[in-house]
Image: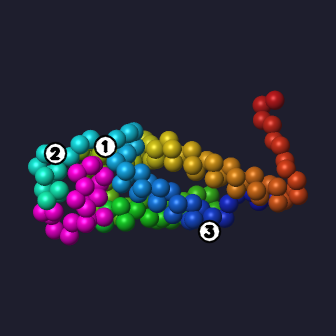
Amino acid sequence: MEIRPNKQWWIKLGEEVSERLRKRTKSGKGLEGSFKSYTADYKKNKAAGKYKRQSSTSTKPDLTLTGDMLRDLQVRGASRSGVQIGWTGSFAERVVHNQEMGREITSSSKALPKELQNYILNRLDKEVGRKIKKQSGKTTVIKVGV
């Protein structure tokens, strides 16, 4: 009995997680809480719209100046066992730069905030449960360590 989600399921989950991470970032929340404030000069210039291709004038740290970096967050690969999301090239460099400035979205030791980790676990739990139920035609209870 195959209970693992298929590649398409993982791709869809990756797209959902990417969108949730973009929304979380735009709300000013990082990996471990709120982002560090912008410098006074950057905040003033951003509010005044002084940057090339600027699409946001928000002075709340949301890592959105042009919107390009957050749009680049996408599914980068998927298989029957998981999905990879992330940034490419200069956008990945911007993520690292923001991390150095106290605005961490992700890290090598913790890829996603606990909230998104729980979302993934919940979705995976539901999908595996659905597949087990489909295979057996009834709800199956599995007790471990009893």
Residue 35 - label: 1
The Cα atoms of the two marked residues, 3 and 2, are separated by 42 Å
In the image shown, does 135 or 22 lie closer to the viewer? 22
* Badge 3 vs badge 2, beta-carbon distance below 8 Å: no
Q: Which residue is pictured at 88% across the width and 58% down the height?
A: 137
Amino acid type of disc 2?
A: Thr
- Reading the chain from its start, which is encountered first: label 3 or label 2? 3
Q: Which residue is pictured at 62% across the width and 68% down the height?
A: 8
Q: Nearer the viewer, mark 3 or mark 2?
A: 2
- Check disc 2 and report the residue beneath it: 39
- Residue 142 forms part of the magenta stretch: no
Q: Which residues are magenta?
A: 49-67
Q: Secondary structure at mark 1?
A: loop
Q: Which residue is pictured at 70% across the width and 56% down the height?
A: 127
Count neighbours of disc 2 (C-alpha within 10 A) and say few if under 14, some if 14 to 19, many if 20 or more: few
Q: Position of residue 97 (x, y in %)?
A: 25, 51
Q: Position of residue 113 (x, y in %)?
A: 46, 44
In the image, taking residue 69 as reference, residue 114 lies left or right, namely: right
Q: Which residue is pictured at 44% across the width and 64% down the height?
A: 74
Q: Position of residue 124 (x, y in %)?
A: 65, 52
Amino acid type of disc 3?
A: Gln
Q: Report the predominant secondary structure element of the magenta stretch.
A: loop
- Check disc 3 and report the residue beneath it: 8
